[in-house]
Image (cartoon, rainbow, N blue to C red):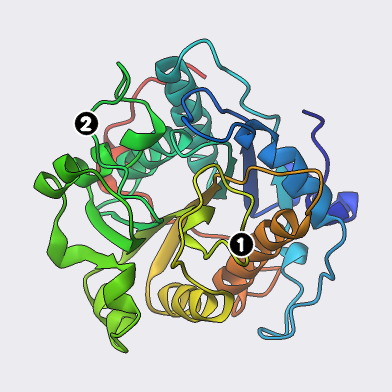
């Protein structure tokens, strides 16, 4: 895919030396089992972003001035395992450069690599998993790096909070922590679910956001749409609260499966990404240096990395 500036921002805000934010495109769609096309998601996302207004009314900010650098796409597709390793290595490289690292998939299996990198670099990490599907299978179709396994490793190594779940295999119930799982049918009648979920989070939070968490009426372009999803303003209310109350250390956005007829989903994904950045930096001046909070286990015991 052709790499271009996110949202068509001026080059002065899109250079790595000046950018606080890193956006890593991962156009991978090697294990999806229904609608194919998530590999076209990053390109459609970047194209749609060029049509956005860059002033955010809600936060009264222009977050692009913090700097957003789009890296070369991670195009490794030899095998799911090799793709995951490539995402892990690239994500970790930019975390170590003291950047706010974000990723844009591609299918949800890319998150195995991104979560692994953040778990290694941040102490006592919460993974906030917003999705229609549990994605907790230890293995599926002969690999542990399938999109259906995207969150299994996180369930074993991090404080996992799952939000919006409304589709799963019975096997996943034996793995899931139901006290930290917010099912869509319960959320519809629970006015306190947002507060309860945030209370269960540790200070450092990584967000993995599968776009099929959203209702198909506003996000039809996903590989596995499920009825009964989240809507725009309740999603923003929750995300804003998470960013305000916790230290969000990074996030990924996955499963945009664009179609030629309706571009609204592409634009929603681009807008959602921009809103999340706006919440992260709404109280930070563009001239201030971004300061990550990497863990002592990483800084005191550096590991050799093949980048």
Q: Is residue 17 visible?
A: no
Left or right of 152 on screen, residue 270: right
Res. 306 visible in picture: yes
In the picture of the structure, the residue carrying the numbered disc 2 is 138
Report helix, strand or loop for mark 1: loop
Residue at image location 48% in from the left, 30% down from the top: 32
* Residue 45 rendering spot, x and y as whole percentages: 73, 48
- Name the residue: 44% across, 19% down: 80
Image x and y of residue 196, in percent: 24, 79
Residue 249 figure quarter: bottom left
Residue sitting farthest toward the left:
174
Give the number of the disc on residue 289. Answer: 1
Viewer-closest of 66 and 266: 266
Does 288 sit above or below residue 219? below
Image point (51%, 52%), residue name: 225
Question: Which residue is situated farthest in the top direction here?
Answer: 78
Residue 197 drawn above or below residue 211: below
User: Which x, y percent locates residue 108?
Assistant: 46, 39
């Amino acid at each position: 895919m052709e790499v271009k500036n996110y949202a068509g921002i001026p080059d002065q805000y899109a250079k790595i030396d000046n950018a606080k934010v890193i956006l890593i495109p991962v156009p991978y769609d090697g294990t999806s089992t229904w609608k194919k096309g998530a590999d076209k998601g990053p390109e459609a996302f970047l194209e749609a972003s060029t049509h956005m207004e860059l002033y955010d009314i809600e936060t009264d900010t222009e977050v692009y001035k913090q700097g957003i650098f789009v890296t070369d796409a991670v195009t490794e597709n030899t095998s799911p395992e090799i793709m995951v390793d490539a995402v892990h290595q690239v994500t970790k490289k930019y975390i170590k450069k003291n950047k706010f690292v974000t990723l844009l998939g591609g299918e949800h299996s890319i998150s195995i690599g991104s979560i692994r990198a953040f778990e290694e670099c941040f102490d006592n990490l919460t993974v906030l998993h917003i999705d229609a599907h549990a994605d907790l299978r230890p293995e599926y179709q002969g690999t542990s790096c399938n999109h259906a396994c995207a969150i299994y490793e996180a369930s074993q190594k991090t404080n996992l909070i799952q939000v919006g779940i409304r589709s799963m295999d019975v096997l996943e119930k034996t793995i899931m922590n139901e006290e930290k799982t917010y099912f869509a049918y319960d959320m519809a009648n629970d006015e306190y679910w947002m507060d309860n979920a945030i209370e269960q989070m540790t200070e450092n939070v990584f967000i993995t956001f599968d776009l099929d968490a959203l209702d198909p009426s506003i996000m039809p372009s996903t590989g596995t749409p499920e009825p009964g999803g989240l809507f725009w303003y309740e999603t923003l209310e929750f995300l804003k609260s998470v960013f305000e109350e916790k230290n969000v250390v990074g996030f990924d956005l996955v499963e945009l499966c664009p179609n030629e007829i309706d571009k609204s989903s592409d634009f929603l994904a681009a807008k959602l990404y921009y809103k999340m950045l706006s919440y992260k930096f709404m109280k930070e001046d563009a001239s201030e240096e971004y300061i990550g909070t990497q863990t002592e286990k990483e800084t005191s015991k550096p590991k050799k990395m093949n980048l």
